[in-house]
Amino acid sequence: MAAEGAADNALGGEDFQEAILQGRDRLQMASMIIVSPWQQDIDLTTKQGSNLWNEGTRPVEEKFTGQGRDVPRFIALVKNQVSKCYMTGIISFNGKNLLADYGMVTLEEVKRARDARNAITPRTISQAQPKIKAQMLFHFIYGSLGSLPLRKISTRLEEINQDGPTLLKIVLIDTFVATQAHTFKVKEQLYDLQLKAFIGNVQTMNQSVREIMVDLQAAGHAINNDDIMIALFRAYSGTVNEEFKNSVMYWKNEWNSCSLTSAEELMAKADAKYDELKKAGTWGKTSEKDEQIIALNAKIASLQKEVNSGNAHASSAKKQENYSWKYDSNLSRSGVYVKNGKNYKWCTGPGHNKKAMWVCGHEPGQCSEDYNKKKGKGNPKKSTAVTTKLDKAALTTMLKATSPDLTASELESKVQALLSVISS
């Protein structure tokens, strides 16, 4: 007993207490089933601990750009690292998770948790884990940042103090602002949702909607499910694919009957249908109705070209008419010449460039040099093209000839549609 007491005194009170705590920790670890090396405490003095540190701090190859549109991808990468390395405890604040509620967790909350963590002087490996993992997260995030976010935090490194959660919050502040203005802008993207803005790609549009929903949720401004459904239905209706449109109508009926209740369920259906049509090679094809309209438009253009061509020939023939007689004084010796029922008189100017000619618009000598300008005559540039529009009767005749099986109502409907196309 005396020997044991001497050993206790040699070990020292605090060291003895630490040894007891470490022994207890080892007993607890021995009784726990380990499914991941990250579940056990990281001892940086061992080779295994050093390997875990290296893996936990290794950055991703595709750096975070610092742009708002890249936030969801960046959040997903950090979330995966936190989950793998069992770091959830250091990013939780009063029941809120910094990665899921980054718009609602304040920087002050994160700093208070950091200061409390740094205030503890760890005496066991377990007590050191929060600080070790906070530093690991810092190096992972720092190494995963692109040039723009790195430049923004370069003046705040002392404030961050190699703390992962603090760095994460500051990076998000630079790319995400949880204000009414930001929320309005994000919601506006949803209300103005149009399939053509995504070049008709349904899956890309749906992914954008999912990111908008996450953004609003993180800011504490989750949008009503019905509003999202209405925006999606309106956007889906912009497709030119008839089979997809029919599916949209069916989904609307499901929604009205309450058998389709969530926006995610609707987007999953739309994703699957789009994928099916793409694989079948029918997504980009026009319907039979569209092809008929295109064919009719081609016929109209052809007929219009023929009409205009005829007018052009007539105008050209008129231009080629010979007016040389107007300058022939020998046509009459009395000073008056009758042609086409009109009396022409010989005038030597000073109008019509002082060139003598037969005239019927004024008395000889009563014209000035600017006479033609006052009368709006001369050689002004004017369009000689005559456009003859196809009227309702012409279109009706043409359609009867090309589609004799049309009923009266069908004929009237197509004529009206074509007239609308022509007028536009």
Image (tube, rainbow, N blue to C red):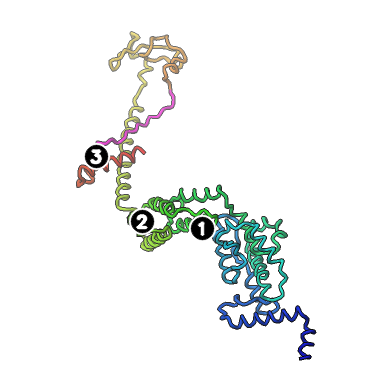
Camera-side residue of 54 and 338: 54
Secondary structure beneath label 2: helix
Taken as a whole, is the magenta stretch helix, strand or loop?
Answer: loop
Measure how far apart labels 1 and 3 are at the Cα level: 55 Å
Distance from label 2 to label 1 (Cα)? Answer: 23 Å
Camera-nearest label, 1 or 3: 1
Residue topped by disc 2: 255
Depth check, front residue: 276 or 415: 276
Tell me which residue sits at (44%, 50%) in the image: 194
Q: Is residue 130 above or below residue 332?
A: below
Q: Which residue is mark 3?
A: 396
Give the amino acid at mark 2: Trp
Badge 3 or badge 2: first in the primary sequence: 2
- Please say if the residues under marks 3 and 2 sit with CB atoms less than 8 Å apart: no
Within the image, what quadrant is residue 26 found in? bottom right
Q: Is residue 418 left or right of residue 33?
A: left
Residue behind mark 1: 214
Q: Quadrant of residue 317?
A: top left
Disc 1 element: helix
Q: Position of residue 256 (x, y in %)?
A: 34, 54
Specify the segment rendered in magenta. 379-398
Q: Is residue 384 magenta?
A: yes
Q: Which one is earlier in the sequence, the residue at label 2 or at label 1? A: 1
The disc at residue 151 is: none
State the image quarter where residue 424 is shown.
top left
Badge 1 or badge 3: first in the primary sequence: 1
Q: What amino acid is at disc 3?
A: Thr
Badge 1 density bin: few <14, some 14–19, many ≥20, Cα 10 Å: some
